[in-house]
Image (cartoon, rainbow, N blue to C red):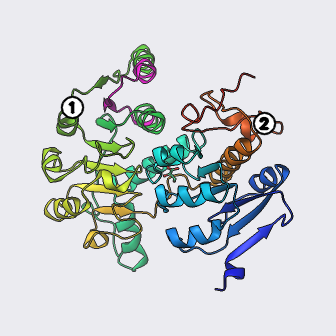
Amino acid sequence: MSNDEKWKVHNPHGDRRVVVTKGLPGVRWLEILIQAGCRVDVCTSTDILSTGEISSAIGDNCSGVIGQLTEVWGNELFSVLANAGGRAYSNYAVGYNNVDVGAATRHGICVGNTPGVLTETTAEMAVALTFSAARRVVEADRFTREGKFISWLPTMFLGELLYGKTLGVIGAGRIGAAYARMMVEGHKMDLVYYDLYRNSALEDYVAAYADFLESRGERPVTCRRAENVEDLLRVSDLVSLHPVLDETTHHLINAQRLKLMKKNAILVNASRGPLIDEEALVEHCRNNPDFRAGLDVFEDEPALKPGLSKLDNVVIVPHLGSATIWTRQSMAILAAGNVAGILLGYPAWKIESTLPFLEDNPPEAAPSIVNSEEMGIPEYAG
Ligand code: DGY
């Protein structure tokens, strides 16, 4: 693919230049950037761009970039962007473990992300993985397609019932709490969560739901905050991971901790791959065929650790947590809003919900700038 084929230029005579390292869904995001007077250069290739390729795309004139979680945004790229006159970078993701925010701040670049539009979507993917693993959906699908369904059998593909059992959620932020509510309400699971911070909204929600169940003569569900990860792993039938990835959560689930889990537990990860020591997980799943895992993310994404794809007790999908049309279009709108907002000199939105940015008359603010305080961007005051 020649360089001209690799980059599609929109609004070529725009006053500012914005580089977008992957094609994004929908059209509204592009309109936002064009209305802000930007020429927009979009990479049409599906390959992961290297730091060198992104640097060349930035060149010596670039005001802002929308980049991907597959790219390493550190000192090198922020220095290139700053030298090209750049002031804004937005990750096309809520997570920004691929971004060195300190380096961006040092180079005078605002960093945005896309929270609030992928909470339920990602939690639903974690639910999908949960039941695919618990009820062996992928194994059974393969078996059926291969023409092996000859007779109904009382012993065929027996899985795990989750109704009324214990759910362990590690990381009870927006997505973890949404997943917890889905599993507690839908499947009457007792909740144990581990988080550095108490989530009183979640605790109150489960308590109110328990009262409701009791009023109907049903067993009330329970909720407690675990003292530590070990405590949660020992008691849970299902464990779902939702913390941010940083040096404190890298390999949060390792060989030792896997051994603490029930032999027939289910482990779900729709957060970030390096939370799990994937080699240890392969070994554990090999030795414990009743243990099951549902993974949306991988340690060396997009590569899988040797042996993972051979395991029948593991369900794997290619980082699809936020992959619904509405969410991916909304993420594009927020990312474009971050870059356009900073270039237009707008203040930073600090209100929890980012949904007003999806409406016809969005606020004149940058939806989510994670280093707004360090960058001295004033807070939106209405
Ligand atoms: C995110 O936004 O961090 C998600 O992982 C993308 O699916």
Q: State which quadrant residue 309 falls in.
A: bottom left
Observer-nearest of 372 and 158: 372
When the figure is inspected, residue 309 is found, relative to residue 365, above or below; the finding is: below
State the separation of the CA atoms marked 2 and 1: 42 Å
When the figure is inspected, residue 343 is found, relative to residue 64, above or below; the finding is: above
Residue 277 appears left or right of 378: left
The span shown in magenta is 186-206
Q: Residues within 10 Å of mark 1 (few under 14, many from 20)?
A: few
Residue 198 appears left or right of 362: left
| Amino acid found under the numbered disc labelled 1 | Asn
**Residue located beneath label 2 in the image:** 362
Observer-nearest of 57 and 307: 57
Q: Residues within 10 Å of mark 2 (few under 14, many from 20)?
A: few
Observer-nearest of 276 and 291: 276
Seen at 35% across and 21% down, the residue is 220
Task: Examine the structure image and report whether residue 184 is included in the region drawn in magenta.
Answer: no
**Residue located beneath label 1 in the image:** 228
